[in-house]
Amino acid sequence: MRRWLLPLGLIALLLGLWQLACSTGAIADALDLESFLVPSPAEVASSLWENRGLLAENAWVTLREMLLGILAALLVGVGFAVLMHRWRVLRDAAYPLIVASQTIPIVVISPILVVWFGYGIGPKVMIVALICFFPITVNALDGLRSVDPEAVKMMRSLDASRWQRFRRVEAPAALPSLFTGVKIAVVVAPIGAVFAEWSGSSAGLGHLIQSDTAYYLVARQFATVAVLAALALALIGLTALAERRVVTWR
Amino acid sequence: MKPESRGTQTVDPPAPRRPELADAIALRDVDHAYAELRTLDGIDLEVPAHGVLGLVGPSGCGKSTLLELVCGLREPTGGTIEVGGASGAEERLARCAFMPQRDLLLPWYSAIDNAALALRNQGMGRRQARAAAAGLFERFGLEGFEAVRPDQLSGGMRQRVAFLRTLIAGKPVLALDEPFASLDAITRAEMQEWLAAALRTDPRTTVLVTHDVEEALYLSDRVAVLSARPARIVAELAAPAPRAADRDAAVTDPAFVATREEALRALREGSR
């Protein structure tokens, strides 16, 4: 109860302060802006309601980009982690490359992918996958390597094949760590999706925010941000739920 | 487990005395080194079928390495190791069941699935493996704990499950690496009695590594005392009353006390 009440109380307090600052015109005056450029929470809420259809449509576009991107990163990342765990040579060769790949800002790759693959969903999924790949791969590999060498000896002596050792010891041992990676991936996925949409798109929450700038639809931009945050929170919640269902021994 | 036993409804727990589970062990002039670090120096040891050999020695002397060598988890740098007449590492691995120092029960499996791990690895279905292990749970005082996850078990219970896991593998040789090192004194004495009873009803050729001389002398037929690294055998002693039903009486018997003192003396000399 307390776990929910305290943060909810803080949110209510902050929203209240924001509402107060807007209705007195304090922020607009301080920034020397027209008041319609500084929407109050109430105005954002009404924009959220009025534009519900448009927001839902674009949210679905962005959500699909994120989900497909995370899924792709999960498949490739876990596969790669398993291969690197199995073959030491591959790990020694590829690991520095994977770390180095993280130094390239996603913002600069994004326009290139749009040039190559066009305005469709493809480049968005690729960008989300690129940004999610690193935390998933690194955490999955860490998890696989966390297995006690004595446990491996025990399994070998109990007639376990390489596959059985993986299936019964290494894979379950890696799960908590893998979930940590997925949680990080889920948090960064919206960043990737929005950047990808800004590089060239015809729909999506990132696209909506960008196009609304030209029309000074600030209330709707805030509403869009709220929807994006809600999507991310829902994904984090689902991941945590899945973790509790799968990792029952912690 | 043989493939033809698959598909039957229940599987009998391993019968108490199986003549096929009677391999002898012979080590001849075994040397071992990790790169430059020499750990074992000319070890000669013999364990007859169903015999129990205790290995004691100072910490870090190479007892565990010796155990891994017997199990085929490592190869010696010199000399030969035979288990049941076979000397290849893979053949030794097929004949030995290794119980590591910590119980290493897998937290994602229930107690019975941990105990039945070897049967599952050998290709048995989950239900049959559980049925086979259930008989042993009953016999070894673990009834009612089948579905419990390892973190809900006491230290002694965990060691029992870990030992059953080793026993159920159905190997002729048991290799136990300080099985009770993590337990408190009372639980440890209880577990020694429990293990003695288990080996009386289900005798196996056993190599027991421990740093506890009393434990070694109570559980083993013979105890080999190793020196500091590189380990040599400094003494080999016959235990006066191996696995006696009354542990307290056995370990306070003058003959036992005298042998224990002798072993401790050898241990001290070997540590220098």
Image (spheres, helix red, strand yellow):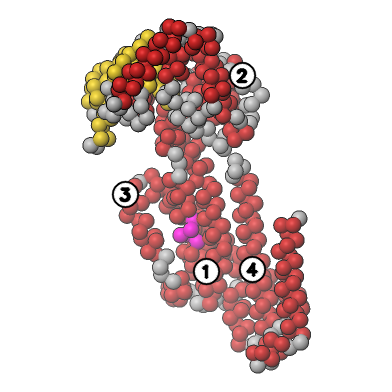
Dot 3 or dot 4, earlier in sequence:
3
Q: Amino acid at mark 3?
A: Val
Question: Distance of mark 3 from mark 2, alpha carbons?
Answer: 48 Å
x and y percent of residue A158 in the render? 45, 27
The residue closer to the viewer here, A131 or B218, is B218
Question: Distance of mark 3 from mark 4, alpha carbons?
Answer: 41 Å
Q: Amino acid at mark 1?
A: Gly
Q: Is residue A55 above or below residue B194?
A: below
Magenta residues span A132-136
x and y percent of residue B110 in the render? 59, 32
Is label 3 in a helix, a strand or a loop?
helix
Tag shown at residue B3: none
Dot 1 or dot 3, earlier in sequence:
3
Same-chain check, marks 1 and 4 = yes
x and y percent of residue B230 in the render? 26, 28
Residue linked to disc 2: B141
Residue linked to disc 4: A229
Count of numbered badges drawn on the protein: 4
Residue linked to disc 3: A89
Is label 2 in a helix, a strand or a loop?
loop
Front of the two marks 2 and 1? 2
Tag shown at residue A192: 1
The residue closer to the viewer here, B218 or A108, is B218
